[in-house]
Amino acid sequence: MIVFTYPGQGSQAPGMGSAWADHPSWELVDEASEAVDRDVARLLLDTDADELTMTRNAQLATFVTSMVVLDAVSRLGAEAVAHAGHSLGEYSALTAAGALDFADAVRLVNERGDAMQAAADEQDGTMAALLGLDDDQVDIACQRTAGDVWIANYNAAGQVVIAGTPDDLDRACVIAKELGAKRAMRLPVGGAFHTPLMAPARDRLRKAIDQVEFRAPEQPVYANVDGCAHTDPSDWPDLLGAQLCSPVRWRQTLRTLDVDGFTTYVELGPGTVLTGLVKRTVKTGNRINIATPADLDGLLEQLAGPAQTDAGVLEGEHLFATERLVVSPCTGVFTLGAGVEPGLAIAVGDVIGTVGNEDVVSSFAGEVMGVLALEGERVGSRQPIAWLRTR
């Protein structure tokens, strides 16, 4: 049982797209730039830390990076049973599950970043991580300030983020230490995200959300607001609107995933924050982080191993580290290329067939083990077309 998870703002780093610039999945960067008329490639390659940390830049850059990573993973044929994202990452999860069109999601994320940046500019706010207190004690620390400070993220046991106006937040941190907090650390953000101070951003974003079509997701998406799985597309406008002013229940989400039987947690995107939170919360889960192309083989190696049970090794088919899947670039009718059959040697860039008017191009060199799509079949975007054994 595999769940893909997607990081939020704060995981970005200067140059985080450089490792992907020559990968076929980089084409999504150009599509994102066109959708919002911004130079997303520059954000991922050339923007310095100060500029990238700005909310409107960090959110767009992080979302697009996660989508590039997802596309690369999909080209290998690895799939998830469910998706979950932390804050901004929820938009990545919805896009991955097919609930949001990629271009629509890029525009929503861009508007979300602009709206949150504007709200933060109007109302001074910040955030801090408290370590070593349980939830009730953190809530007490916030309540005792009698000011504008609230719990913003339930990240893991003993790791809770609070947010509010700077003076009230500082008072809450002092009280938290009196209650036994091991550490109280200011976070390098420019707003009190996931609190009532984001109400202006919520109202602005909701207008954009109402202009977008939400489709039934192909896999369940677990929501930040309640930590539960959702498959009804009509749920998401309210959930995304509420998310800006309510805490991210990430620890609760991970526990729900654990109860629901998920055993492998794959973080797609920059950084390793979510992988670390899984380690603290789900003691028996497999944890995999994909941030660069170099991580892809590690993913295949971990997924290739036979499943273990108390009774021993389970028999069955397994994905080997030397195998790759070539997937459809778009939705349309598949036509097989001349001479493509099992045993054929394929080089990088060779055309296996067409989908509509677009070529199905292999990103790998190897031997065709099988063709998985039927001649004349209508296939969906990223649907497996051919199975290769790589050299």
Image: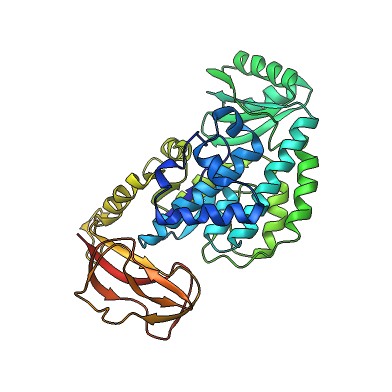
Residue appearing at x 43%, y 83% in the figure: 377
The percent coordinates of residue 69 (x first, y second) are 44, 51
The percent coordinates of residue 368 (x first, y second) are 24, 71
- Based on the displayed image, in which of its 4 quarters is residue 130 positioned? top right
Q: Is residue 275 left or right of residue 163?
A: left
Query: In the picture shown, does residue 336 fall above or below 187?
Result: below
Q: How many marks?
A: 0
- Based on the displayed image, in which of its 4 quarters is residue 62 positioned? top right
Observer able to see residue 111: yes
Residue appearing at x 79%, y 40% in the figure: 199
Query: In the picture shown, does residue 24 fall above or below 148?
Result: below
- Quick one: 383 or 264, which is closer to the camera? 383
The percent coordinates of residue 89 (x first, y second) are 56, 47
Pick the quarter of the image with the N terminus.
bottom left
- Quick one: 84 or 324, which is closer to the camera? 324
Q: Is residue 150 left or right of residue 181?
A: right
